[in-house]
Each structure stands twice: as C-alpha cells, then as structure tokens.
Image: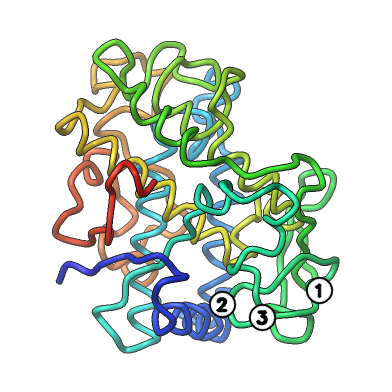
Amino acid sequence: MTVTRVNILNNNSRRDQFIRGVKLLKDDILRPEWPNTYDLFVIWHYVAMNTFTPPSQNDRNSAHRGPVFLPWHRWLLILMEHHLQRVLDDDSFGLPYWDWAGDGELPSTEQKNAPIWRDDCMGGSGNPVINGPFAQGLWKINVREDAEGNLVRTNSSLRRNFAARISKLPNRTEVQTAVNRGNPNVFYDTDPWSAESISFRNELEGWLNTPPSKLHNAIHVWVEGDMFFGTSPNDPVFYLNHCNVDRIWSAWIKKYNNPEYLPGDNASDDLKGHRLSDQMHSLVEENLFDPLYGGNAKPNDFLNVSSIYEYDTIDLQSL
C-alpha cells in the first residue's frame, strides 16, 4: 500500500496518530534484552553518526556529511513509519512533515510561537519542555549524548531552546533556490563527497557556507536542546524535520527527472558505505527490527519509493 505523508498542521487526525504512535513505541519492546523500539532509533542515529568506515572518510560518517545522508535517513523514516503502522494497527498511516519553510516566512520574533508549537501539537521550548504532549512527566529521555559526545543513560525530560544559536528558520525562497540550483552542472553530490561538496545533497543537508544552505542543519540548530546532539531523534520533531527534507529531495528528483545518484559503484573504497550499492549502516541486522530490508539496505533501494509512500504536495511553490 502506498501511504500519503501530509503536513502535520493540515491533518489533526494524523497529528494525533503520530503523537500516540511514538508514545506507544516508548513502551514497545521487540526483544527482552533490547531498549524500547523508539530508543532503538535514537541509538541507531547516534551510532551511525559516530561510525567512520573506512577511517579515511575524515568528516564523512555512516549517515551524514556525505552522499548517503538522504537515502540513509529515508531508510530510517520508512522503518519508523512501519513500526508506527504496527503499533497503531493502521497500514494507511504515513508520517507527517513540518513545513518549516512556511514558518520561516513569519517574522523571526513570531517563529517561536508558530502553530506547530501549540499545546495540541509538539509543545514549545524549555529546559525542560513543560507544555504539550512531550512535556516533563509525559515524555521520558532514556539515552542521551553528553557534552563529551558519549552515549549515556539518563532519566530526564525533553529540552528545546528555540533560536538560541540562530535567529530564524529557512524560508521558501531559500528552499526553492536550493532545488532550482540542481541543474546539469550541479549533481546530486560531487567530489570531495563531504561537507565541502558543491552539490544539491550538501546544500540540503546544510554544510555549505554560501546561501541558501544550512537548510536541514538549521532546523536542528534553531530548535536546539535535544535536537542539537547525535541523539536528536529523542525529540519527535526530528521525524517531522526529516520528512520535510525528504519531501524536498522528492521535489528535486521530480524536477530533474530522476537524476543519477553519485557516487557510483566504481568509486574509491574511501567512499565505502556511500556508493550506490554499498550496504548502509544498520544497528540491528535482523528482521524483527527491520522486516523490510533485514538491515541490508543500499542507497539504490531508495531512489524510487513510489510504491511505499508519496507526499500530499511536492510543488515547488509549496516547499
């Protein structure tokens, strides 16, 4: 079944399902020796960020700062969507997205009070967050990256600190400029296949120092708190952000008629894990956690996902 992913602010039923589903996953144990299913995703993301294979990748890790960034996170989203469908007992459920570029159209002083931060949606800012469905006492953080970069056990609440490091969210013009820049002279990714690449992937991921860049990264930095660390999936807003990032990638693919993923299989072994047919980083290589790919997913598996999901709109004017 192909499911439809929608704007979380346009569908109250989907919003409520998402909130209920992630809370159910906090109580869902797939194996007695494992943490809950939601926290498995948190740990997976952290470990992938700290896995460098081979070491010569320098700043590239197994999920970021390189070509695999978009397909790896697409894989994570599809698996999260699957587990939400399972605990909600609803095969038609599709992850919602946060249209943060729409909020970026608001004056910067109003962005902290955008509708997504209402009590009936994601709640607001705070250390700890004290309103909404993920407020203190309603949402527990069990594992977290500490200030030294270590993964530690904790028993604490969600943290956010809106606009503490950057003053505003990306807007529609910035997103559309990034998509439109993907012309025949700007490929999906390019040498040096890193945070220095002049490419669509790197512009969307947000490492380039030229405007509009900072797109995906800017969301993590603007929300701050738990979203700032490698354990950023602790904040359910992580999934709303990445769904929107994936939606922008989908719009780019459509605009340029399925452009080639790069690097290909003949690229240097220094790019292991980022090439078209390389196995991507998996936390648990067994069907219980990943019944769809068995932990053996490759970038090539995620270039056409039309049989799995679609977005309500990928029109450039809506991005």
**Residue that appears at 51% across and 47% down:** 101
- Compute the Cα span from label 1 to label 2: 16 Å
Residue sitting at the far front: 107
Quickly name the residue at label 2. 36
- Residue 272: image quadrant is top left
Residue sitting at the far bottom: 89
Mark 2 surroundings within 10 Å by alpha-carbon count, few (fewer than 14), some (14 through 19), many (20 or more): some
Quickly name the residue at label 3. 119
Whichever of callouts 1 and 2 sits on the residue coming sooner in the sequence is 2
Residue 5 image position (x, y, % from top left): 32, 65
Q: Quadrant of the N terminus?
A: bottom left
Mark 3 surroundings within 10 Å by alpha-carbon count, few (fewer than 14), some (14 through 19), many (20 or more): some
Whichever of callouts 3 and 1 sits on the residue coming sooner in the sequence is 3
- Residue 130: image quadrant is bottom right
Quickly name the residue at label 1. 156
At mark 3, the secondary structure is loop
